Amino acid sequence: MHSISLRFSQELTQRLNQMKIRSTRYKVALYKQLNQEQQPDGHKLTEIKAENTEFAFNIMFERKNPESEWRLVTPLKFTD
């Protein structure tokens, strides 16, 4: 099972809630830093693909309708 920081998942959810997405399901690709010393703000994962990152895994969010809040549906282990 993949693990993710609870704070990072909450930040992702907040960003999705601010975006104009019309669908009720949304997949986010997560990437990990190739050089572990370059981790921004203690995050081990990022949703930004760059030259110094590699694909880690996808997570899925869903909501009941386009006006409701997003929720994470991928089973994950949460870390501090």
Image: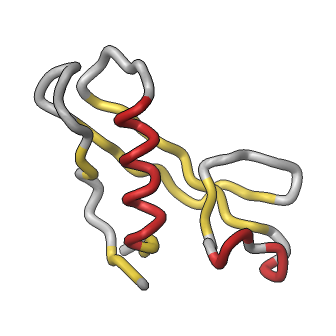
Furthest residue toward left: 64
Quarter of the figure with residue 32: bottom right
8 left or right of 47 in image = left
Count of residue discs: 0
Q: Nearer the viewer, residue 7 or 27?
A: 7
The residue shown at (64%, 57%) is 31
The residue shown at (45%, 71%) is 4
At which x and y percent is residue 75? 26, 63
42 left or right of 68 in image = right
At which x and y percent is residue 14? 39, 46
The residue shown at (73%, 69%) is 40
Quarter of the figure with residue 1: bottom left
At which x and y percent is residue 21? 38, 20
Can you say whether 22 is above or below 78 in the image? above
32 left or right of 28 in image = right
Q: Nearer the viewer, residue 16 or 61?
A: 16
Q: Quadrant of the C terminus?
A: bottom left
At which x and y percent is residue 3? 42, 75
Can you say whether 33 is above or below 37 in the image? above
Colour convention of the picture: secondary structure
Can you say whether 79 is above or below 41 in the image? below
The residue shown at (29%, 55%) is 74
Q: Nearer the viewer, residue 39 or 15?
A: 15
